[in-house]
Image: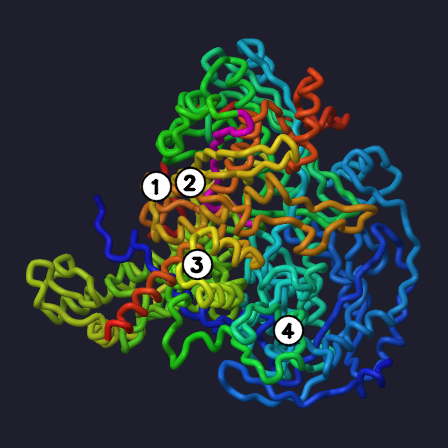
Amino acid sequence: MMDAIAKSEKALLGLRINGESRDVLVAVHKTLLEVLREDLDLTGTKHGCELGECGTCTVLVDGEPVLSCLALPIECQGRDVLTVEGMAAGGRLHPLQQAFAELGAAQCGYCTPGILLTAKALLAERPAPTRDEIRVALSGNLCRCTGYTKILDAVELAALRMASARREEARA
Amino acid sequence: MKRFSIIGQSLPKIDAWAKVTGETKFADDLTMSRMAHAKLLRSPHAHARIRSIDTSRAAALPGVYAVITGRDLPRVKFGILPVSQDEEALCVEKVRMVGDAVAAVAAVDEETAERATELIQVDYEPLPSLMSIEQSLATPDVRIHEYGDGPNVHKAVSLQFGDVEAAFAEADLVREDVFFFEGNTHLPMEQHSAVAHWGADGKLTLWSSTQTPHYVHRLLAKILDVPGAHIRVIAAPVGGGFGGKLDPFAHEIAACKLSQLTGRPVKITLTREEVFYTHRGRHPVLMWVKTGFRADGAITGMHFRSWLDGGAYGSYGVASTFYTGALQTVTYKIPVYKFEGARVFTNKPPCGPKRGHGTPQPRFAMECQLDKAAEQLGLDPADMRRRNLAEPFTKTANHLTVTTIGLGECIDRVVEASGWRQKWGQLPPGKGIGIACSSYMTGAGTAIYWNDMPHSGVLVRADRSGLVAVLCGATDIGQGSDSVLAYLVAEVLGIEPKDIRVHPADTDLTPVDLGSYSSRVTLMAGQAAIQAAERLRARLLEAVARKLEVESEQLVLRDRRVFVADDPDRGVSFAEAVVLGESLHGVLAFPGSYAPPKRAGKYKGGGVGPSPCYSYSACVVEVDVDRETGVVTPTEVWIAHDIGRALNPLLVEGQVEGSVYMGLGEVLMEEQVFRKGVHKIPSMLEYKTPTTLETPEIHTILVETDDPDGPFGAKEAGQGPLLPVIPAVATAVYDAVGVRIDEIPISPDKVLKGLDLKARGKTPRVGPERYPIFAFPPPRAVESGFGLPADDIAVRPFAS
């Protein structure tokens, strides 16, 4: 049994994570969550159940929210993986991160990375979502601290700021 | 009106930036070179004798570094409370619940460790298991423990404050009601995790997701039989606690021992299923309450009985038992009061403290009964409560000292905001509105182990750069305790929170704070921080006064400067003030200490319930009840909370909203239930909690009362606001469909059952019909303290 595991197939995977190319040699049965946290030391991605039930481990793959605890890295080759560590481009916080910090949307902060990324995908698709649309988009991400109120507020604030930034850009 | 620079502002938490970028290192995010991974083998039996354990096959598995059983640990039992030392990290002779740990493995990786646990052979002799209060009381020949107040009775208490029978005799209405509150669990998003490193110097360091590093430190010394001086416990940022990370746990102890044996750092992280068994959550409580009312709704007296399903171990259970009877008296005038409570052992995971510790269950019972009484007396339930509020700065029947009470304003504000007067009894069928009130303590007035030392300590050190370092044993579990310490110190010193670095929860470096429980940290660590900062401020003022040739009293600290109040241009920067201060006095490092005023009632059990001050909340909930499915949908919540003073309104709102959310989960969905000792639903999918879709809009109103015992007047916010939500929903359901559900959770099946009873012309009530026959001990009769003036509120230890 042990021998079977020891000899279990490893694969050299070329992943594109947060805009960087990373080669990893991993056992093929390892999940994306495990590879991110254990092989790439990207511990910003958290786990709450490792069964696909809580949304905590959400990352974006080609812009789509994916539960990294259920995803196999081998399926992610050649695709863009974004984790919370990649949200702040060039050291500048993403408007969602800024709004979450300002409005107290992160209490213990454990569910925060998954929620930030889910919200980012929502805003990419619907730049001006209604509060109910935000509720639906985040309904797969559990949070036990906040009662969700400040999270919804923060997504709304970020959407407003991003819209006004786009208007500024268009004017310039 | 006091004026503040930092206090009262809605500032981001000091750790907000780390949390939104993934920088925060939780316990499971820590890695070390040569680190091993550990797993526990847990009992599949609810109650069984262990005949033998054979670990040889596991030990022989390649990649396994060490395998231990309870025989590798000192044979000493432990528990969080000195009176309930009944746990073993790894059970030796007997298991008492499914999930009890019996062996532990350290291996090269988690997978190998898990495989090794499967190779351990345990020979169990199953014993009859006891699964309910009734069964445990009715089966005295099967004993879960050999200690307690009777066969399978962990604790039985009886307290009497005045003559309740006389009070009932003079009442216009006497009600007796029975209620049941099913157990539920904290479900923090972070699974418990710990990393232990027993260094080559023979000293142990444990990083753990714990809310109580100090208690873990103390108990590890006992459990491992190692001097406490050689143990360091560091609380990692906690990814959700709610009371679930307050005990020392098997996984922490096993990691320490395995690290000693392997010479490697050892990490262990629980699976989600293990978290459900580790638990220590809300006790299932059966309650009987008898109350006398006058025609105007005034309470003449109350007799409250509670039976707690404690599970397999003591944990905080003795305190939980007293808490089910302690805080009934602090909201309304109750001149005489009697309480009887019993905690019973069963073969299920032990219960303990969850947000509100032992008080949400009786609050549910009491507020629902008030609603029934109001209906019988023809009174508006909001008015009835409003007219009978406890008197500020007095003692209650059970000798608790209440200080400021903002409950009247809380009621007025939620009545106004919700449109109560236009809605109560007047909404269309299927829609309803309910109100309830509550109170919670701002920190337990007594420590878990008896001592005269501070409950919280802070060290404040000023650096020549102008940085101020704040060291405190308090544990940030997301509530923002680190930030609160920074705000308070910044306020006292006239600097910004960013100029402060808080170093929390490290038993080597930080003065003891007892832990993040009983809503104690803002008040207790906060007062200690203020004292330490004021000591630093005095030295800085002295040095700057000498330099500027003025009196200290002429100086103010503000905007990172120390200057003459009348001549703001004359002054120095804060960093220069530190240089002047250090030049004059030497190193600038000052301690602050806090212990609560000694107000415990002079009777056994009087130590549970006293607090420096009590927060108050009033809540109105509107619901929609689907008569076809029985589903109750809360559509809007208004809650007003007496916070004393909101040090940071944003953080207070967050605590209130989170409490409301958790209360809604408890009242409508959450159940920690077992079949033959096996958890029925140990997953986040099946253990239902509200998502964004089930959580309604929450309108939070903060009421300030500036309590003399609070730091800048502040009281607690983290637990109290959960309490009124549950009965407010229950009474709203009654307003909507005329059905009383006297049992939590109010699940659709119960609502349908109630509607069916109503349709058939029977009493439309769903809830327990009976309670156990149980001989409580004779009551300790103590004179009622009701209406006595509060003791001198200014007196507390270490104040100067």
Circle 1 Cα neighbour tier, 10 Å, few/some/many (<14 / 14–19 / ≥20): many
Q: Amino acid at mark 2?
A: Cys
Identify residue for label 2.
Answer: B613
Please tell me which of labels 2 and 4 falls first in the chain.
Answer: 4
Residue A15, above or below B622: below
Identify residue for label 1.
Answer: B707
Q: CA distance from mark 3 to mark 1?
A: 28 Å
Identify residue for label 3.
Answer: A105
Image position, residue B539 (x, y; %): 24, 65
Image position, residue B607 (x, y; %): 55, 40
Discs 2 and 4 carry the same chain letter:
yes
Label 2: which secondary element: loop
Discs 2 and 1 carry the same chain letter:
yes
Circle 3 Cα neighbour tier, 10 Å, few/some/many (<14 / 14–19 / ≥20): many
Specify the label residue B196 is tagged with. Answer: 4
User: Residue at image x 58%, y 18%?
Assistant: B164
The magenta span reads: B429-447
Q: Amino acid at mark 1?
A: Asp
Q: CA distance from mark 4 to mark 3?
A: 32 Å
Image position, residue B392 (x, y; %): 37, 30
Discs 3 and 1 carry the same chain letter:
no
